[in-house]
Image (cartoon, rainbow, N blue to C red):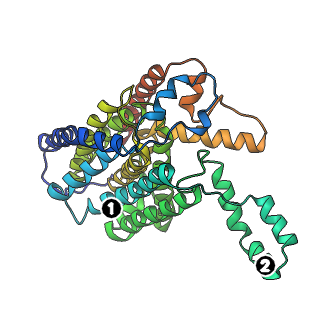
Amino acid sequence: MISFLSGTADLAHILGFAILGGVAAFLWAPLLSRFLYRFKVIKGPKTELNGVNGMGSHSYKATTPVMGGLLVVVTVAVITYFFDWSRSFTWVPVGVMLISAILGALDDLLSIFGSERRSRKLGHVWRLIKVHNEWKMRMWYLTTLPWTAFKRMSVWFGSRTERGILVHEKLILQFVAGSITAYWIYDRLGPAWHFIYFPFDMEWNAGWFIVPIVILTVMFTANAVNIADGMDGLAGGMLIITFSALTLLSWINGFGEIAIMDATAIGALTAYTYYNIKPARFMMGDVGSLGLGALLAVNAMAIGEIGSLPFLGFMFYIEALSVIIQVGSRYIFGRKVFAMAPLHHHFELKGWSEEKTVMRFWVLHFFFVVFGFWLALH
């Protein structure tokens, strides 16, 4: 277990930042809300939910603004910069969070105000390779066919939308954010962070393999939180639970600056979730879910808890896996495993109310986070 006493913050001091983050977020939440409503930062109804029986409870969300996640991202970034800035431990997590949040903000804004964007289907490109009049263009389409295939395959895992940043573009920018994290952990933090620690004193020296592991972890976690942000209060409540565990683990392991940052996130998330409880005043949007998902992953890896991360982010990963399973089953076996993916919509179509689904997911997530916390202490 990595232990590095990077600050003298005691638990009372750390919890004070949870209060500070909450007070600050509550104070400017009405300003953010008025801004989002005034400029109509509203995506409208989700295409994949249109006409689906049992989804009538989502109709009011067509007029609910997105980008409410700015409340958390901005609060955490500002408080960290002025009160918890550390060249060793907080600048990279904040930077990666902001990169991911900017990516999410662009997607949110382009989804609302941008023009339609479409990518060519593989069949169309293949026909162009065979029939295009210019041989140079035929060679170009043939050479770029793998890239076209990647773009089309990435669409399988995205929402059905003709606006915003395309899925493959998101993945590339998330790869950049993950690469920054990997460089920081591998080169700047030192050899101790090349190890992956498991419960009961087991460890694995991953060496340079830690680089792809970190990149994939950041990308997968950011998208997992984004996928789970589909019901009022769902992502916010589960993030509060996860960041609470990360705060305590950071403090126990001696990472004072990381603990303060996570505590600030708890306070800001409390204010956000207050306004996001059904009927939501605003929704998190990609700006919040991608940014906070990346922050979650980076902070867990910075304190050496990558081995416990599957439990600390349990329901987020379950939600993401449900999408992967659904897509794989549809394209390989031609049938669906779930009534609808991600998993929260499956239970909603089975008759659970949105409130029941959210609260049961909170309870399950809390249980597995506690289990992950217990494992991390061993």
Q: Secondary structure at mark 2?
A: helix
At a point 53% along the width and 57% down the height, the residue shown is: 165
Under mark 1, the amino acid is Gly
Residue 106: horizontal and vertical position, in percent? Answer: 44, 56
Q: Please tell me how crowded label 2 is: few (under 14), some (14-19), or many (20+) other residues with Cα within 10 Å.
A: some
- Report the front residue among 165 and 34: 34
Side (left or right) of 44 relative to 101:
right
The residue carrying mark 1 is 95
Side (left or right) of 35 relative to 41:
left
The residue carrying mark 2 is 139
Under mark 2, the amino acid is Met
Task: Residue 195: give its label.
Answer: none
Residue 142: horizontal and vertical position, in percent? Answer: 78, 73
Task: Please state which of the two labelled residues, at mark 1 or mark 2, is closer to the viewer.
Answer: 2
Q: Secondary structure at mark 1?
A: helix
Residue 187: horizontal and vertical position, in percent? Answer: 37, 71
Residue contact between numbered discs 1 and 2, judged by CB atoms under 8 Å: no
Quadrant the C terminus occupies: top left
At a point 45% along the width and 55% down the height, the residue shown is: 218
Residue 371 sits in which quadrant? top left
At a point 32% along the width and 58% down the height, the residue shown is: 93
Residue 262: horizontal and vertical position, in percent? Answer: 27, 46
